[in-house]
Image (cartoon, rainbow, N blue to C red):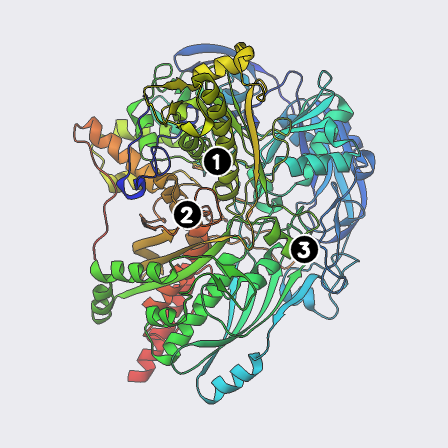
């Protein structure tokens, strides 16, 4: 057999040949040799190029768009404003009452009103991208400016201008999701005998920043009677729906396919207005049209995330047990609700899951989505979890300090250890290894000598700190879990179809959408394992609305759990069919045969009797007269999978050791350890890669990246000079240890692994920085922590020390 | 505004191409869209991400910062020149073995950066490799596996394989 994988003893446990092994990635050869096909690599004959005229003021009435000079620019073919293009708006809805949710609409091109700098106002089409730029420059946009709403304060001010007329108070969602009995009593009791932590944490606006920007190529195909839209998206079927709706054409006349994709991280799991415009242009101009977002557009007008403020009050008894949690959450969602998730995406996630891995007996939470004159938000890897985990983990640290408890100890006393656990938030947590991961992380720190170094460093005048973060992450949200969020479209299931050809090789479809997660390899591993064939005999198909009946794409760590389960079920059904035919051909009972794990079916009471898949396929297609009567020709099977109940929770503990440089304020990592549990690991190297890459993005949020605006709403981080993306010298080596608590509800025992790294890192880093500052009295509760912040903290501490000794 | 096109001869991956180009056309665009060498990617067009890195006379250069006309008389090498047919080079194989790529969008830039770097600094250890690799951005991997892949290649080319992640010690 070719391609024998390198087995990894830890995960092999007799489970099989393919699942659990770090097999070489199937997608690598083409990506390593420049033979991948990304959307900007698509070139069609006669292709035109589109670009957008964008607003330069944050908030204004749009009084005129003059495209006359634009259309006269050499090379420019056409130019349109909203009225010319006449497309339907993008509308994302929640099934919630008006006092909780205010629906708003997002036009494809701005009409009447401008709501953020970078908002598309008109579109220019030209023969080459250089002429597009010339055309954009020639366009004159007239506006009547309004004061800009750029923060929680300006949004909620009594005289604040309304970003949307429908939402005069600039609040798009306002839910008091929980107010359980006993909150006030617990705080009263803690005030008398215990402690109360009262804490405000902020996190800055961030850009998910896939290295490949967004882009699309659209072309009408007369033969298929369809508009073919090639686009880098995580959600092809949702893109199809919105394009068809906005263009007012039947969905059948739109086909969406996805080529190789250079990352997404959530930014590409919503439908962008530019892609709708380009699709419409291709039809209107009857020519292929391409649009590739440039980096400046991606930084200023792309979907953003993470700008949140938490006020967290927590009551603890004297033993360090949390007795109540009362939280107010405000998420700055920017100018529009994204499709399909709406502006509720961040606050609803935060409010539902804030109790995290702890046994919280009483809980009150109010969460709001604010609308401001900034580029709108979309889900970004982790969605609110990096923020609520940061808030609750800072609560734990503050409580530990007030009670003089070790940070690990206070977590040990509060962490959920019995499963399934139904929390105060009415969510049922399936089995995980919360305490085990925490203790393993603590052991790593102690046994490697970091705990000792931390003590020693203090005497040497060095600022060394250790930070922990213990958390879980709901992955594999099924329809039931999403229905609780009350979105009007309810994602959840996945469908897979598997087909075997005349040679015994299979093609399997998945409604998930790879954009770097290695699905071509991992989903193929699952199929190879289930059918007992070589992975080279398995080809995955994704990202084509014609080939895949329906799919929800890839987000929320759903691919291995839900998509992986669907391909596994489909492969299992195909296996049954193969066995039925084989039994007939071997002239034995169906119960007397089984898949042999080597690409064939074996007779159980006489293993010398075996028939290969190739031979079965030969009969199924080419000599169908030999088939059993009840079996139809062709070998295919379809299956769908949905996660029941509340989904499945992955968990992890991160531990980091940092040293602060008193000269530069730089935070240097001495060690970063991740102990993670995503259930059954399909491909250890891929899981570790997801953890490391995720942690890098979490570190980015903790120490570097911040989308900033001037008071007038003008973005001030419009290039990589100002938006600081960490490089190899800022991201440390990270060890990854695996615990494995198999998921009982997925087909393969896997839980999601895509987001965890990003979730745990900000709290870990912030806790470590605070630990390094522990003897200074400074507490930092906001991210990112920039060198200036550290320097100021150290300066303050030095001044107060001098004053104390003076 | 559009300016006069001029005849430019570019030597790319050992082949000479005669092209009619506007002076403002940048090398990355010409490689990708005029010559169809789409292995070179563009991530920022302002010289920071390094996705567009190619070798110009053996030196790693950001092709988004160079006008195509400036590359006349030079020897340009892109990712398409690595390997023979379907055969991957030692560096490409190391990227695969160490899982040094996820989405693969940054990969050509890192490969060309590393090719140039290893030619100039064959004795580089893991720290120097990390420093060199910090010239480019990757959003997926967290860099560790890229550093491992390049350091491993350097070690193998020196005849001492097996350099990999070092555990930090207090
Ligand atoms: S595209 Fe050239 S450096 Fe980013
Ligand atoms: S692998 Fe995706 S950007 Fe590097």
Chain where mark 2 sits: A
Q: Is residue A115 left or right of residue A377?
A: right
Q: Is residue A137 visible?
A: no
Ligand 2 under 8 Å from disc 2 Cβ: no
Q: Is residue B64 left or right of residue A176?
A: left
Chain where mark 1 sits: A
What kind of element bears circle 3? loop
Check disc 1 and report the residue beneath it.
A568
The answer to which of marks 3 and 1 sits earlier in the sequence is 3
Check disc 2 and report the residue beneath it.
A726
Instruction: Name the front one of labels 3 and 1.
Output: 1
Callout 3 touching callout 1 (CB < 8 Å): no
Q: Quadrant of residue A163?
A: bottom right
Check disc 3 and report the residue beneath it.
A486
The answer to which of marks 2 and 1 sits earlier in the sequence is 1
The furthest residue to the left: B160
């Amino acid at each position: 057999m070719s391609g024998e994988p390198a087995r990894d003893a830890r995960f092999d446990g007799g489970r099989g040949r393919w699942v659990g092994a770090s097999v070489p990635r199937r997608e690598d050869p083409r990506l390593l040799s420049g033979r991948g096909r990304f959307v900007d690599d698509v070139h069609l004959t006669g292709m035109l190029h589109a670009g957008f005229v964008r607003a330069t003021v944050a908030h204004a009435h749009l009084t005129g768009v003059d495209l006359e000079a634009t259309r006269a620019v050499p090379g420019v073919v056409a130019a349109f404003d909203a009225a010319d293009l006449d497309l339907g708006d993008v509308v994302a809805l929640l099934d919630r009452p008006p006092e909780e949710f205010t629906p708003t609409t997002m036009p494809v091109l701005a009409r009447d009103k401008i709501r953020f700098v970078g908002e598309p106002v008109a579109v220019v089409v030209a023969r080459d991208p250089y002429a597009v730029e010339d055309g954009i420059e020639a366009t004159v946009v007239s506006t009547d400016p309004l004061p800009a709403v750029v923060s929680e304060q300006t949004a909620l001010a009594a005289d604040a201008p309304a970003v949307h007329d429908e939402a005069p108070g600039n609040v798009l969602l306002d839910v008091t999701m929980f107010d359980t009995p006993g909150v006030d009593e617990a705080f009263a009791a803690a005030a008398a005998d215990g402690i109360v932590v009262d804490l405000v944490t902020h996190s800055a606006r961030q850009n998910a920043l896939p290295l490949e920007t967004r882009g699309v190529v659209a072309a009408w195909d007369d033969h298929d009677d369809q508009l073919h839209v090639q686009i880098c998206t995580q959600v092809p079927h949702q893109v199809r729906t919105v394009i068809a709706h906005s263009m007012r054409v039947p969905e059948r006349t739109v086909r969406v396919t996805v080529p190789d994709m250079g990352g997404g991280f959530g930014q590409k799991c919503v439908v962008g207005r530019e892609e709708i415009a380009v699709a419409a242009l291709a039809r209107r101009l009857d020519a292929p049209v391409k649009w590739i977002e440039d980096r400046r557009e991606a930084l200023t007008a792309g979907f953003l995330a993470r700008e949140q403020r938490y006020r967290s009050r927590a009551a603890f008894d004297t033993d360090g047990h949390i007795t109540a949690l009362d939280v107010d959450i405000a998420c700055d969602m920017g100018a529009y609700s994204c499709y399909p998730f709406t502006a509720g995406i961040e606050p609803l996630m935060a409010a539902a899951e804030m109790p995290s891995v702890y046994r919280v007996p009483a809980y009150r939470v109010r969460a709001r989505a604010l609308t401001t004159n900034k580029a709108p938000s979309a889900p970004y890897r982790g969605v609110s979890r990096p923020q609520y985990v940061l808030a609750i983990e800072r609560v734990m640290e503050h409580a530990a300090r007030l009670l003089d408890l070790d940070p690990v100890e206070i977590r040990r006393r509060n962490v959920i250890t019995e499963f399934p656990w139904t929390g105060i938030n009415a969510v049922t947590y399936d089995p995980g290894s919360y305490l085990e991961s925490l203790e393993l992380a603590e052991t790593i720190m102690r046994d490697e000598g970091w705990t000792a170094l931390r003590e020693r460093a203090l005497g040497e005048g060095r600022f060394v700190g250790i930070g922990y973060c213990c958390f879980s992450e709901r992955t594999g949200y099924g329809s039931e879990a999403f229905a609780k969020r009350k979105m009007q479209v309810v994602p959840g299931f996945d469908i897979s179809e598997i087909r075997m050809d005349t040679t015994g090789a299979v093609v399997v479809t998945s409604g998930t959408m790879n954009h770097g997660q290695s699905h071509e390899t991992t989903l193929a591993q699952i199929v190879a394992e289930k059918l007992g064939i070589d992975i080279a005999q398995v080809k995955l198909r994704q990202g084509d609305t014609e080939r895949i009946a329906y799919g929800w794409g890839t987000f929320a760590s759903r691919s291995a759990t839900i998509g992986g389960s669907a391909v596994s079920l489909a492969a299992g059904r195909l296996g049954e069919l193969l066995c039925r035919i084989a039994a007939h051909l071997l002239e034995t009972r169906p119960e007397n045969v089984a898949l042999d794990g080597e690409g064939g079916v074996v007779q159980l009471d006489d293993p010398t009797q075996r028939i290969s898949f190739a031979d079965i396929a030969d009969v199924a297609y080419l000599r169908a007269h030999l088939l059993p009567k009840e079996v139809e020709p062709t070998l295919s099977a379809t299956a769908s999978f949905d996660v029941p109940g509340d989904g499945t929770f992955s968990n992890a503990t991160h531990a980091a050791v940092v040293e602060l440089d008193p000269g530069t304020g730089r935070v240097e990592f001495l060690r970063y350890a991740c102990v993670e549990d995503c259930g059954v690991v399909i491909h250890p190297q891929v899981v570790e890669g997801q953890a490391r890459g995720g942690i890098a993005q979490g570190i980015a949020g903790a120490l570097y990246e911040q989308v900033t605006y001037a008071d007038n709403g003008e973005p001030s981080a419009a290039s990589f000079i100002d938006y600081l993306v960490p490089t190899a010298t800022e991201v440390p080596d990270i060890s990854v240890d695996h615990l494995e608590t198999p998921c009982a509800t997925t087909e393969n025992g896997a839980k999601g692994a895509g987001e965890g790294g990003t979730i745990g890192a900000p709290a870990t880093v912030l806790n470590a920085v605070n630990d390094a500052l522990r003897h200074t009295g400074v507490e930092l509760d906001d991210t990112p922590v920039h060198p200036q912040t550290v320097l100021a903290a150290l300066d303050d501490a030095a001044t107060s020390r001098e004053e104390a000794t003076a | 505004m559009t300016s006069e096109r001029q005849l430019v001869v570019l030597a790319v991956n050992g082949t000479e191409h005669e092209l009619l180009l506007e002076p403002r056309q940048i090398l990355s665009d010409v490689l990708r869209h005029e010559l169809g060498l789409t292995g070179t990617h563009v991530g920022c067009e302002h010289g920071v991400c390094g996705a567009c890195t190619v070798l110009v006379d053996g030196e790693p250069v950001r092709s988004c910062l160079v006008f195509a006309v400036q590359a006349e008389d030079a020897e340009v090498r892109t990712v398409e020149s690595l390997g023979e047919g379907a055969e991957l080079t030692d560096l490409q194989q190391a990227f695969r073995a160490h899982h040094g790529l996820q989405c693969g969008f940054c990969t050509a830039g890192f490969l060309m950066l590393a090719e140039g770097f290893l030619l100039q600094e064959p004795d580089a250890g893991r720290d120097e490799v990390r420093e060199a690799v910090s010239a480019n951005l990757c959003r997926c991997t967290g860099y560790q596996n890229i550093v491992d892949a390049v350091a491993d290649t350097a070690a193998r080319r020196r005849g001492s394989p097996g350099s990999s992640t070092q555990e930090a010690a207090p």
